[in-house]
Image: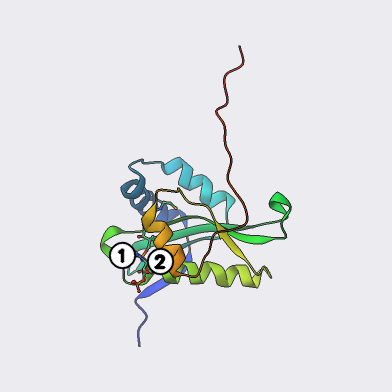
């Protein structure tokens, strides 16, 4: 059977479509950010159907971050609104997890906004659970 949907590493030619999908999700267009992601992160995958990018996922293996052994981190995922609920997100996560396994890590983590119920539902459906960490932040005031 001909496989119409493929997952492969992102290339420069995919960046405009990735930026467009991201802009539809976040409301912000940031082509320079995506060019930087492509330069810095080899685990930047896209799911394509013919020449159309339907979704992307970005992550990396981080070593001993926060004192924990090397593990895979997913820090960006997006699927075109008209291509959702057809398994694209699942396939992208499976593909990056396969890469993590090849790097010999046995855990994957992500961080998401507390009010992003859609992404939470997605990651929970994949078997991800609350991790034994909490995120902290503070405002950085300008020095006088
Ligand atoms: C989250 C997202 C990647 C899921 O992609 P997708 O291709 O629709 O995911 P799948 O089709 O593989 O769905 C897998 C499971 O996730 C859950 N899920 C996905 N969308 C859901 C929704 N709208 N409501 C509830 N559960 C949902 C379901 O359990 C689903 O399984 P099911 O179809 O058997 O019920 C996509 O909705 C998206 O891009 N959302 C915006 C992402 C975002 O906000 N990114 C910024 C922060 S990184």
Query: In which image quadrant can residue 78 be found?
Result: bottom left
Mark 2 vs ligand 1: CB under 8 Å? yes
Secondary structure beneath disc 1?
Answer: loop
View quadrant of ligand 1: bottom left
Residue at x 28%, y 58% (from the top left corner): 81
Q: How many C-alpha atoms fall within 10 Å of the one at disc 2: few (<14), some, or many (≥20)? A: many
Residue at x 69%, y 70% (from the top left corner): 104
Query: In which image quadrant can residue 99 be found?
Result: bottom right
Residue at x 43%, y 71% (from the top left corner): 91
Q: CA distance from mark 1 to mark 2?
A: 8 Å
> Is residue 143 shown above or below 120?
above
In the drawing, does residue 101 fall left or right of residue 33? right
Secondary structure beneath disc 2?
Answer: helix
Looking at the image, which is closer to me, 40 or 79?
79
- Residue carrying label 1: 84
Mark 1 vs ligand 1: CB under 8 Å? yes
Residue at x 34%, y 76% (from the top left corner): 4
In the drawing, does residue 107 fall left or right of residue 56? right
Find out whether the residues at labels 1 and 2 contact each other: C-beta distance under 8 Å.
yes
Q: How many C-alpha atoms fall within 10 Å of the one at disc 1: few (<14), some, or many (≥20)? A: few
Q: Which of the labelled discs sits on residue 89, or is there none?
A: 2
Q: Tell me the quarter of the image containing the C terminus.
A: top right
Place of residue 83 in the rendered image (x, y in percent of width and height, measured from the top left): 29, 65
In the drawing, does residue 33 fall left or right of residue 2? right
Q: Of callouts 1 and 2, which one flags the residue occurring earlier in the amino acid sequence?
A: 1
For this orientation, the residue located farthest to the top is: 144
Q: Tell me the quarter of the image containing the N terminus.
A: bottom left
Place of residue 116 in the rendered image (x, y in percent of width and height, measured from the top left): 39, 51
Place of residue 66 in the rendered image (x, y in percent of width and height, measured from the top left): 70, 50
Looking at the image, which is closer to me, 61 or 135?
135
């Amino acid at each position: 059977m001909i496989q119409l949907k493929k997952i492969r590493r992102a290339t420069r030619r995919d960046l405009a479509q990735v930026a467009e999908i991201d802009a539809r999700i976040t409301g912000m267009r940031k082509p320079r950010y995506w060019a930087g992601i492509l330069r810095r992160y080899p685990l930047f995958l896209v799911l394509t159907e013919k020449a159309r990018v339907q979704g992307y996922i970005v992550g990396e293996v981080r070593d001993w971050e926060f004192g924990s052994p090397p593990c895979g981190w997913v820090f960006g995922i997006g699927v075109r609104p008209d291509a959702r609920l057809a398994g694209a997100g699942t396939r992208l996560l499976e593909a990056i997890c396969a890469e993590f396994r090849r790097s010999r890590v046995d855990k994957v983590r992500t961080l998401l906004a507390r009010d992003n119920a859609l992404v939470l539902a997605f990651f929970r459906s994949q078997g991800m659970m609350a991790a034994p960490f909490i995120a902290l932040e503070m405002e950085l005031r300008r020095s006088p």
